[in-house]
């Protein structure tokens, strides 16, 4: 460092630089030099790795005075219930070099608009293990270099409708990995996942029962995308046929062989990829089949009744002739009985 100051002093004499400009330059070098800036008392700073850790110190906000050279910031096990607007820009650090920000397990419940403003070079953000019930539509605004976002086991059921606008490609144009496993998601947003840069989408252990054909078509157009969908309560009926054929004909689903049916009850526990297409039947299809069968049987019965009605005279004549034939036959039996009432006894007498 002293050699650098001497070089600046020589340069100053040769170029007649004003003293005040030299002082500002030297001050900038000193401030930005690793290890010069103090570390917050609640944190642990490691100069060589540019890592700052703030663990289990009951913080309620981002601590003040984190060194501006920090590249990796880990804040976990605290009580930061709300990430306010410019929560990182206003603490005096600047964070120009920050590339990884991990905020798991801080009981974060809400993220205000532009909360991550000032983190222009951030590439990895981890918000897992929180209890987010409120996310502003432009909460991630300004994170143009963000490549990986993790929100596993971090979302309350009420935040689902707020999540997808916040993840719009206009807010996160460079996003390649999105982890939202272990939440309560029941639906997906085609618009939020329309960016062609997305390469990994983890949707495991949510509440998804089906996926629309339009969403699958969108995913298929992103040939680099890998999707994980296991441990969801899939409803294996006719609505799931697009997913069924997708699983059978693509390698985009990283855990396609693990997709298990939750319903209907007759298919509970069945592996989706091992079913046949005719197994995926909707209840209304079955009801329609019974209705159709009933209509066919009714038509057959009506035709039979109509035939009987049109041939009523012939049927009466046939019945009359049948009755007469039966009567004549009975008369013949009666006559033979009168002539030989005990034919078996007569044979016995003749033998004696």
Image (tube, rainbow, N blue to C red):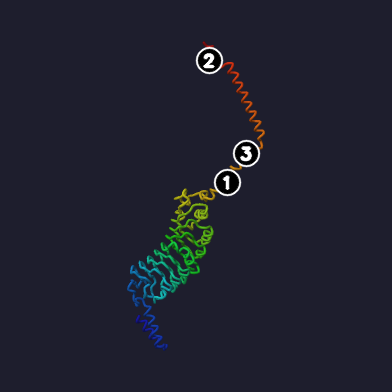
Q: Quadrant of the N terminus?
A: bottom left
- For marks 2 and 3, give the CA distance: 52 Å
| Mark 3 element type | helix
- Residue at 45% over, 56% down: 232
Q: Is residue 20 above or below residue 250?
A: below
Question: In this view of the protein, which residue sits in the foreground, 198 or 154?
Answer: 154
Question: In this view of the protein, which residue sits in the foreground, 306 or 259?
Answer: 306
- Residue at 40% over, 87% down: 20
| Mark 2 element type | helix
Locate residue 333: give its quadrant. top right
Question: In this view of the protein, which residue sits in the foreground, 292 or 87?
Answer: 292
Q: Earlier in the sequence, mark 2 or mark 3?
A: 3
The residue that label 3 is drawn on is: 305
The residue that label 2 is drawn on is: 345
The residue that label 1 is drawn on is: 292
Locate residue 305: give its quadrant. top right
């Amino acid at each position: 460092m002293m050699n650098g100051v001497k070089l600046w002093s020589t340069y100053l004499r040769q170029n007649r630089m004003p003293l005040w400009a030299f002082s500002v330059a030297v001050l900038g070098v000193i401030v930005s030099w690793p290890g010069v800036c103090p570390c917050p008392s609640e944190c642990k700073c490691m100069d060589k790795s540019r890592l700052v850790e703030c663990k289990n110190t009951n913080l309620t906000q981002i601590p003040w005075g984190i060194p501006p050279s920090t590249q990796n910031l880990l804040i976990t096990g605290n009580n930061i219930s709300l990430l306010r607007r410019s929560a990182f820009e206003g603490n005096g650090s600047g964070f120009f070099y920050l590339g990884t920000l991990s905020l798991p397990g801080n009981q974060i419940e809400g993220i205000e608009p532009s909360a991550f403003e000032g983190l222009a070079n951030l590439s990895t953000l981890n918000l897992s293990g929180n209890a987010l019930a409120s996310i502003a539509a432009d909460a991630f605004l300004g994170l143009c270099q963000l490549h990986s976002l993790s929100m596993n086991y971090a979302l309350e059921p009420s935040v689902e409708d707020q999540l997808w606008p916040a993840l719009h490609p206009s807010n996160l144009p460079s996003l390649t990995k999105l982890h939202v496993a272990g939440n309560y998601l029941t639906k997906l947003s085609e618009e939020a996942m329309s960016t062609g840069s997305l390469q990994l989408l983890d949707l495991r252990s949510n509440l998804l029962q089906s996926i629309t054909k339009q969403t699958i078509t969108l995913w298929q157009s992103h040939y680099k995308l890998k999707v994980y969908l296991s441990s969801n309560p899939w409803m294996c009926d006719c609505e799931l046929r697009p997913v069924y054929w997708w699983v059978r004909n693509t390698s985009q689903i990283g855990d396609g062989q693990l997709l298990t049916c939750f319903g209907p009850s007759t298919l509970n526990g069945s592996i989706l990829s091992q079913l046949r297409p005719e197994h995926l039947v909707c209840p209304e299809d079955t009801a329609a089949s019974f209705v159709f069968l009933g209509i066919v049987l009714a038509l057959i019965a009506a035709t039979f009744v109509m035939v009987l009605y049109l041939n009523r005279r012939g049927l009466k004549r046939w019945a009359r002739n049948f009755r007469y034939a039966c009567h004549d036959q009975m008369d013949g039996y009666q006559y033979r009985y009168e002539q030989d009432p005990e034919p078996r006894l007569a044979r016995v007498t003749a033998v004696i």
